[in-house]
Image: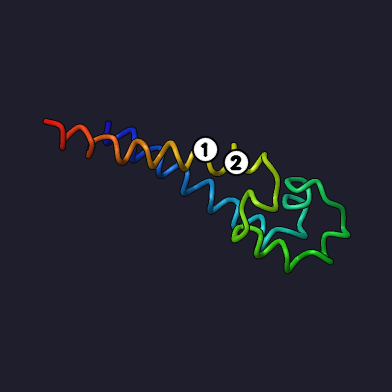
Amino acid sequence: MALTANIVVALVALLHVYFLMLEMFLWEKPAGLRASRMTKAAQAYRGLAANQGLYGAATAGRKILFIQAMPAALGLSLVLLPERSALES
């Protein structure tokens, strides 16, 4: 179970590094524009995009819950699961 937890946590970390790269460095580049479904007008929102990760699902929409929060919650659950079973035995 610990190996599964480590793999999920690593995947979540990589996912968040990808989002960071898109929002902070690639926002005005073709990859960032495709990912955010924005046009060149995205240049006006560059500062907001760089801070997007700080606000999470409260202002970004429900889709972010499934793409970012659910995998992170799964990883946290898997990390805590072995601790719980060790305490019971």
Judged from this view, the residue extending furthest toward the left is: 89
Task: Give x and y (percent) for residue 63.
Answer: 67, 39
Q: Find numbered disc 1 in the image and state the secondary structure of the residue it sits on.
A: helix
CB contact under 8 Å: marks 1 and 2: yes
Q: What type is the residue that disc 1 sits on?
A: Met
Q: Viewer-proximal residue, 55 or 43? A: 55
Task: Give x and y (percent) for residue 89.
Answer: 11, 30
Residue 69, above or below 28? above
- Which residue position is annotated with label 2? 65
Q: Residues within 10 Å of mark 1 (few under 14, many from 20)?
A: few
- Which residue position is annotated with label 1? 70
Q: Which quarter of the figure is the N terminus placed in?
A: top left
Residue 78, above or below 59? above
* Residue visible at 49% across and 38% down in the picture: 71
Task: Give x and y (percent) for residue 33.
Answer: 78, 51
On the rendered structure, is 43 left or right of 19? right
Residue 47, above or below 20? below
Count the marks: 2
